[in-house]
Amino acid sequence: MNRTTLQAATIGFALCLASPVEAQTLRSATYKGWNAYVLENDLVRVHVVPDIGGRVIQYALGEKAFFWVNPDLLGKTSPRTGLGPDGGWLNYGGDKLWPAPQGWDNEHQWPGPPGAVLDGRPYRAETDPAAPAIRLTSRDDPQTGIRFSRRIRLHPRSTHVSVQAAMTNVDDEPRRWGIWAHTQLDAGRADGDEEYNRLLRAWCPINPRSKFERGYRVIFGKKDNPSFEADARRGLLTVSYRYRVGKIGLDSHAGWVATVDGRTGHVFVQRFRYDPDKPYPDGSSVEFWHNGVGRIHAYNKWMDMPDDPAENPCVFESELLSPYARLKPGERFTWSYDWYACRIGGDFPVRECTPAGVVSEPLACRRDRDGRRLRLRGRFGVFHLGRLVLQACDEESAVLATEILQPHATPLKPLVLDRTIQLPSATSSIAVVLQDTQGKTIGVISRWDGDLPDMADCGL
């Protein structure tokens, strides 16, 4: 296929793809008995309940709901104290903000949960239907001296939810905290065949310059917990839910965490920016906690966790932390992160992640004998509606040719690549790119730079 033919094909596909922009709304709703707001488009729904500690109680791609919601507290709101009847934690589930670090040694650690104000009391909600977005603001917390707020926005034709979190010092003396974005994912089994989902896993890059010996540190639980496995060769930590209690932290540098439900191939992604020059609570940008059986030392005592999902539910927590912020009275610190979702089609890993999508099976290639035709294979998931294209580039990174790989790419379906193409003779690199319907690049999914591979390099 020559360049003229490729360009003509691209224009033709663009015309075929033209369609009305999807509906995107912010409206009041009821969610499992709570008064809520829902941000939604044709791909995702985000339910926000201000009355239960400003929680995003659910994020769903199609029919797949990712977050755990406590069945014992459905529709219930906390009393004026922000605490349960016995003064304990009202663990509603979903996603919320906490101050970090957690601990019980001194006043510079947050001794929750519970946290009566920041976790348990209602948040003020301000809506922006045009974005659409919603802003949640806590009450002033005398214990920590801070006030939380965050703006949650849903982006069009995408699973992308951006969150801008803020922490304000409302005390009359300096305060030093980090922001802790705390997300509880559902690790249970709806079909009842097993008590927990053995195919729920997460992948997170290990910092090659990590301050931790194994690339992560154990915070709670056994040092040899098999739920956490570091692969130094690939530079990835694999986290597998096994219903064993434990928590780890890692100074991950790459800015992403991907959790996969292998039963269905659904992927939930959290993206963030890592600042290597700033200190972090627990020295960690990412932390994982697993509910399960075992013993931990917390709240200044040893605790044996019950072997009963009714008392100790199947919850997989994937948590992001900001750097520390030292705030003078009245000062405000902001920190942003993002959520995305897609499907990869089954029990597959996530090897790479960009703002456009994930790579489960990296781009692999095999030449024909003449060196001009190339067989491509790979498995990907995308975060946005658009089209997947292959770009062939020369040594100066100029695009020589573009070929449509998938004209109707959607986060609701995996993208499995297996096809043969012909490349211009000057090709020195290839890239799998996600574009919108007008041909504008959203982002690169996977790239092969340098010399194109020989058969022996591809393993095909």
Image (tube, rainbow, N blue to C red):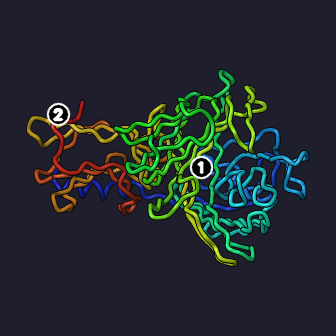
The numbered disc on residue 319 is 1
Q: Residues within 10 Å of mark 2 (few under 14, many from 20)?
A: some
Is the residue 151 above or below the residue 413 in the image? Answer: below
Residue beneath the point at 35% across and 54% down: 444
Q: Is residue 186 above or below residue 294?
A: below
Q: Judge left or right: residue 323 versus residue 389.
A: right
Residue 225 in the image, given as x and y percentages of width and height: 56, 31
Q: Amino acid at mark 2?
A: Met
Whether residue 442 is visible, yes or no, is yes
User: In the image, what residue occupies the spot 64% across and 51% down?
Assistant: 182
16 or 145: nearer the viewer:
145
Q: Residue at x 26, y 53 (%)?
A: 391
Task: Check disc 1 and give the amino acid type.
Answer: Glu
* Residue 311, horizontal then vertical, whole percent: 78, 32
In the foreground, 447 or 113 = 113
> Which mark is nearer the camera, 2 or 1?
1
Mark closer to the chain start, 2 or 1: 1
Name the residue beneath numbered marker 2: 455
